[in-house]
Image (tube, coloured by chain):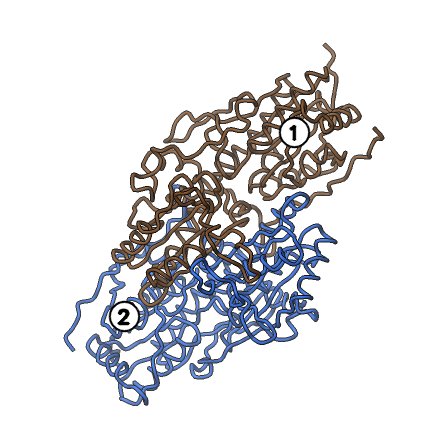
Chain colours: A blue, B brown
Amino acid sequence: MKIIKKNAFYAQSGGVTSVINASACGVIQSARKNKKYINRLYAGQNGILGALNQELIDTSYESDVEINNLKYTPGGIFGSCRYKLEDYRKNESDYDKLLKVFMAHNIGYFFYNGGGDSQDTTSKISKYCIKKGYDIKCIGIPKTVDNDLPLIDCSPGFGSVGKYTAISTLEAGLDVASMCETSTKVFILEVMGRHAGWIAASSALASSSRKKPPHIILFPEVAFNEKSFLNNVKQNIEKYGYCVVVASEGTKNKKGKFLSDSGSVDAFGHAQLGGVAPYLAGLIKSKNGFKCHWAVADYLQRSARHIASKTDVEQAYKLGSYAVDLAVSGKNGVMTSIKRISDKPYKWKLITVPLNKVANVEKKMPKNYISSDGYHITSSCRKYLEPLILGEDYPKYKKGIPSYSIFKNKKVKKIKI
Amino acid sequence: MKIIKKNAFYAQSGGVTSVINASACGVIQSARKNKKYINRLYAGQNGILGALNQELIDTSYESDVEINNLKYTPGGIFGSCRYKLEDYRKNESDYDKLLKVFMAHNIGYFFYNGGGDSQDTTSKISKYCIKKGYDIKCIGIPKTVDNDLPLIDCSPGFGSVGKYTAISTLEAGLDVASMCETSTKVFILEVMGRHAGWIAASSALASSSRKKPPHIILFPEVAFNEKSFLNNVKQNIEKYGYCVVVASEGTKNKKGKFLSDSGSVDAFGHAQLGGVAPYLAGLIKSKNGFKCHWAVADYLQRSARHIASKTDVEQAYKLGSYAVDLAVSGKNGVMTSIKRISDKPYKWKLITVPLNKVANVEKKMPKNYISSDGYHITSSCRKYLEPLILGEDYPKYKKGIPSYSIFKNKKVKKIKI
């Protein structure tokens, strides 16, 4: 049977991670190995917008060395976007545009690397193309630091944020422990997690004992109780001399209102942007009088490739390369995924799950992963989290800073459509 | 000549760093090599308070392996303190106590590891003991992330914060560059530096071009001009699609008022604790409407041993071990210091400086280190900073997190005095 060579399209979507480029590396390297099927691999500039606006990057101009270094480079090398496609039954114009671009550039493979929304997009595009009789294999590649994707052992990007969070908690904990006799008694670290507390939970890997930091973890899944929290802080200070709190940005009160929306006002009279950590510091200071320090990690946590989890990097890479293998073998409408085989040693295998089962489902922390007092994790949770931060995979350094990839990102000539 | 063996006292003071324990390691290993002179090395629990309250830790109970691992451990292993000794001509009681403790425990060597205030303390103790005819060698060991000590090429602890800041700026910069098309346009990183902008300056090592992050650096040495700043942010976004700002916590307006005190109010009606980053984000959002993200590194930056500068670790270690060598050879009243011999390759040597010339002098950024527009560094500054972040010196890892030292910290029996 004669193989009809086609071009492939790959794009990155949503908030980036320190290992989304490792998935890109997997896709590109596997596409280069599958030259029998794939002619050129185009990347969308700024996610799906690249396809919609025909801003296509021809990855064949990048050297093998630079492609390999993608594995060590944080951020999204081709740019990402936050853009949600409407249902094509409601608004077909975007789909119509995409199809024309795919046809004009002979795209036969579509790879979309993102979270729940992106899997939804991939699913819709796959269905639309089938409906229109256009032959394209659409494969989703998972990614999200929030770890809230269903049907996968863990979301690529999460293990590295978890490692960053555990190490930061350990290190800042040693700092405040040194200072607490005459200075700071409380340190608060704010981490990402609007609806799910996975990142905050991973801080618990800093120590196996609740006597050591983090003493208190705040999850979006547990309603914040001011009195109990303040008591808990005080007790930790009485017992250990200090208290380290790790707070999810999405920590809410009983009424479901974010603490960060609880009345902090900036110098311009507007509600403060983000900031559950300064809120808690203000609370502790005004109610208990303890000296507090606080940090907000924000983008630092999800771009900290310098301390990425080797396990996470490997999974991200393989989920990308597997997607290409599946597509060239004719698979369509699935997301590459990870199934855990054992905890210790951590063993896992690549599987596929149907896109429509992933889209728009959010995996929160299970109840049996949060300790009965609501302020820490259980041993089941620890068993789940521990393998995800294993291993270091350092980038190369030049003049004291990591040598991250710089791409030419040469554009494909636009075709009039 | 018969050598009279004495005990030694070492303590850590002020805000800790990721390499102050490397200095402790140098002191302890050198003391163990100098058994001819030094019997036992006692460490003060929580700095000078340990001597005042006779809370002495006998370091001889710690194994050689654990001592060596101190080189890789952030925080202050014996605890630190913020405590300023008054002039003994005004209040002699603390000095009287110290002398009694020294005599009771046969202390003949005093090593104090800290910033400007601590060098002042060491100087005062040295003078007081001379006055009282008590034979003790007092040597200061420098330390401060702020890099504001005079008569030394750089302060130990600074190179590692500089490396952390440059890498964080690089990594978060790649993140926001990926997101800027449809989401965040401005990222602000707040770093330490109340009076001197050294840490913020080090972010410039993320790139050799002003076209790349950090686009704007705010120094305490340069009065903040709102209009010019907002224009600058806008121009960067117009040119590059996004803008990364690194702000010193001590950024002030023309009247010398900290921006972080400029009216942010927490939910309890109190002035916001810290936070120049959220202030700037509020300003940009309200005046220009750009979407901002911000991070406050706080303790994370000065405890990030996982990404310490090898150059910094080596200097911290040698400044500690040199102090012991000096003391046993009879030197008194000096601080160990570093003199730069060449920039490229970076060559330096150990020297000593008189304690009283270090105390209470603050080294700010020289004018020729700040670019003429006030928002970046000059090539002279780059030449000065570059070698300080060179080299990586990773700790060992176990289960995905660094194996930092845990000490027994066994106390010496108190003697009634």
**Image position, residue B148 (x, y; %):** 48, 34
* On screen, residue A35 above or below B125: below
Q: Nearer the viewer, residue A347 or A112?
A: A112
- Residue found 63% across the figure and 68% down from its top: A381
Q: Residue A137, how many percent across, how many down?
A: 33, 80
Circle 2 SS class: helix
Q: Which residue is mark 1?
A: B86
Quarter that holds the C terminus of chain A? bottom left
State which quarter of the image contains the N terminus of chain A: bottom left
Q: Within 10 Å of the Cα at label 1, are there few (<14), some (14-19), or many (20+) other Cα atoms?
A: some
Q: Amino acid at mark 1?
A: Glu
Q: Residue furthest top?
A: B1
Residue on which the image places disc 2: A50
Residue A62 x/y as whole percent: 27, 58
Instruction: Quadrant for residue A64, please give it.
Output: bottom left
Looking at the rendering, which quadrant does residue A207 occupy?
A: bottom right
